[in-house]
Amino acid sequence: MPRLWLIACGLLLLAGATQAAQQALLVGVSEYPALPERRLPGAANDVRLMVKSLSAIGWRPTQLQVLAEQGDALPTRANILQALERIALSSRSGDWVLLYFSGHGAQVPTQSGLDEAFLPRDTTHWDDKRGELRGALRDKELASAVQRIRAQGAHVWAVLDTCHAADMLRGPAAGPLSGLRFITAPELRIPVHLWGPGRRLSASALRQTKRQGGAATGRYVAFFAAGKDEASLEERLPDPLDGRQDQRYGVFTWALARALREAPTADFASLARRVGAAYAERPFPTPEFVGNLETAWPW
């Protein structure tokens, strides 16, 4: 009997050792040294709010990696790519990975039209000789990182609180809005013939998550703050968790934090409906929710 008891305990310990894990990469870019007039104070608050929200539903500090001005490291292009690669290498079948991005988005020229891109802290300007926006993180690169994680059998939830356009200006707005997360092509020094009339929009690689780097077996859910040619919003709002002092937040992140507080146990579809309800009386943007939305909320 003692030997059977020891065997049973060993099996339980083995099961615990192989239990599915969870980890999150939280990226918030508020400062753009090469584009100082386009700083986003709300992005840093967004990341802090996500840390509080995830902690409130049981995530541990060791499961959260923060790339922000006051995080574990600065949100540069190299640091983001390195963090994504570490996650791909450490993920196992059944794990859940949250990839969260808050900051500026842009549309950049390609041979077939315009692609979406996320702008890390070290984004500079268009390089005409190399045909690229220096420092930008293309949607295809993000999609490839997602696929490498899913190829391990891990599940991915991607959340992007950023605009997907480069043809409007982020700045003060009339009425209750305090700002739009937009940055213009001229500000990035992209020649007008590369982004002007007649340019065709390419499909978002991150939205489609085409198979790259091996067959993807893990599930995939993505929450986008705006359509591919819309701005996302940043406003002064009360903390959705404790109602304390107003700060600038991305409206999408604020709505997500409130939804997590109100319904910590749900499926992604119901969580998406709660987030979308925050936009019911707004003329724009139109958030998008794609992927395996029927999946039960895993935390």
Image (cartoon, helix red, strand yellow):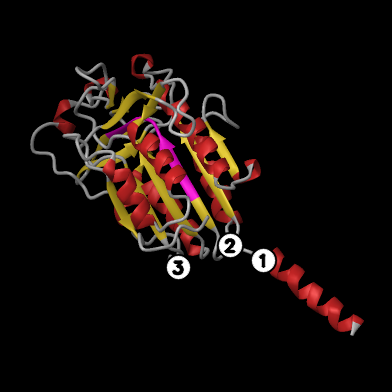
Estimate the spatial distance between the alpha carbons at disc 1 and disc 2, rounded to whole Å: 9 Å
Mark 1 crowd level (few <14, some 14–19, many ≥20, 10 Å Cα): few
Residue at numbered disc 3: 217
Density class for disc 2 (Cα within 10 Å; few <14, some 14-19, many ≥20) is many
Q: Which residue is identified by label 1?
A: 18
Distance of label 3 from label 2 (alpha carbons): 11 Å
Image-quadrant location for residue 159: top left
Residue 289: x and y in percent read 30, 51
Q: Amino acid at mark 2?
A: Arg
The residue drawn where x is 58% and y is 62% is 92
The residue mark sitting in front, 1 or 2, is 1
Screen quadrant of the N terminus: bottom right
Quick check: is 103 in the magenta stretch? yes
Counting residues from the N terminus, which is met first, the one under dot 3 or under dot 1? Answer: 1
Q: Main secondary structure of the magenta part?
A: strand
Which residue matches tag 2? 92
In this view of the protein, which residue sits in the foreground, 164 or 85? 164
Disc 1 vs disc 2: Cβ atoms closer than 8 Å? yes
Q: Is residue 125 among the parts visible in the rendering?
A: no
Viewer can see residue 237: yes
